[in-house]
């Protein structure tokens, strides 16, 4: 099962839906089977959502170096190490995104998907592969893959044109 945050386009109501797969969601949406539980509108789409991914067991939580405090509380605005009793940040309200933002994100995701159709996934050998193409050691082709931030900086410093993808891409063998 997969859980999607959904949003009613007419009323901006947000709710959650459970589906067998992404394809199940798309089929139900095409057939008009989805409806907002608050207003009954069938204008329902996936809402932008951030996954809640747990930390690996071997990772530690970094403490912030400084924390901004509420000036209305009478502080000077900055506390080193959060040791002066700084208030925790206020919770973020779950408001629907403006339609313009949804449209922009959708267009950007569509452009990326179209670009990836003519690109080959090379995985973790990305830096090695683009470096070999740049120096004429292999034929040029459009590729995408994974590399570290440090390696990406080195590629750019060598004059190799690369760019990050705006949205994460699952390796072909890891998709539903």
Image (cartoon, rainbow, N blue to C red):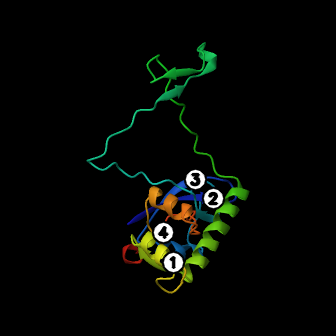
Between discs 3 and 1, the one toward the N terminus: 3
Residue 162 % position (x, y) = 56, 68
Between discs 3 and 4, the one toward the N terminus: 3
In the image, 33 versus 112, the foreground residue is: 112
Q: Are marks 2 and 3 in contact (CB under 8 Å)?
A: yes
Q: Residue furthest left?
A: 57
Q: At 42% across and 51% down in the image, what residue appears? A: 52
Disc 2 or disc 4, which is closer to the eye? 4
| Displayed quadrant of residue 92 | top right
User: What is the secondary structure assignment of the residue under circle 1?
Assistant: loop
- As measured in the structure, the alpha-carbon distance from the residue carrying label 3 to the one carrying label 1 is 51 Å
Disc 3 or disc 1, which is closer to the eye? 1
- As measured in the structure, the alpha-carbon distance from the residue carrying label 2 to the one carrying label 4 is 26 Å
In the image, 122 versus 23, the foreground residue is: 122
Between discs 1 and 4, the one toward the N terminus: 1
Q: Are marks 1 and 4 in contact (CB under 8 Å)?
A: no
User: Can you identify the residue that label 3 sits on?
Assistant: 14
User: Can you identify the residue that label 4 sits on?
Assistant: 169
Asked if residue 44 is positioned above or below residue 174 in the image, the reply reads above
Residue 106 % position (x, y) = 64, 66
Disc 3 or disc 4, which is closer to the eye? 4
User: Can you identify the residue that label 2 sits on?
Assistant: 8
The answer to whether 61 appears left or right of 133 in the picture is left
Q: Which mark is residue 135?
A: 1
- As measured in the structure, the alpha-carbon distance from the residue carrying label 1 to the one carrying label 4 is 27 Å
Between discs 2 and 3, the one toward the N terminus: 2
Q: Quadrant of the C terminus?
A: bottom left
User: What is the secondary structure assignment of the residue under circle 4?
Assistant: loop
Task: Say few, some or many: other residues with alpha carbon within 10 Å of mark 3 (under 14 / 14 to 19 / 20 or more).
Answer: many
Q: Which mark is residue 121?
A: none
- As measured in the structure, the alpha-carbon distance from the residue carrying label 3 to the one carrying label 4 is 25 Å
Residue 98 % position (x, y) = 70, 53
């Amino acid at each position: 099962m997969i859980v999607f945050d959904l949003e009613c386009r007419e009323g901006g109501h947000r709710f959650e839906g459970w589906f067998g797969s992404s394809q199940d969601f798309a089929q139900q949406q095409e057939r008009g089977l989805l409806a907002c539980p608050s207003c009954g509108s069938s204008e329902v789409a996936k809402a932008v959502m951030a996954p809640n991914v747990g930390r690996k067991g071997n990772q530690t939580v970094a403490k912030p170096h400084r924390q901004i405090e509420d000036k209305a509380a009478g502080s000077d605005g900055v506390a080193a190490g959060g040791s002066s009793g700084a208030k925790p940040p206020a919770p973020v309200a779950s408001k629907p995104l403006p339609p313009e933002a949804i449209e922009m994100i959708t267009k950007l995701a569509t452009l990326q998907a179209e670009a990836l159709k003519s690109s080959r996934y090379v995985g973790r050998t990305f830096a090695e592969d683009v470096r070999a193409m740049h120096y004429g050691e292999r034929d040029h082709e459009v590729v995408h893959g994974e590399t570290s931030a440090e390696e990406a900086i080195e590629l750019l410093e060598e004059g190799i044109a690369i760019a990050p993808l705006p949205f994460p891409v699952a390796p072909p063998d890891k998709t539903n």
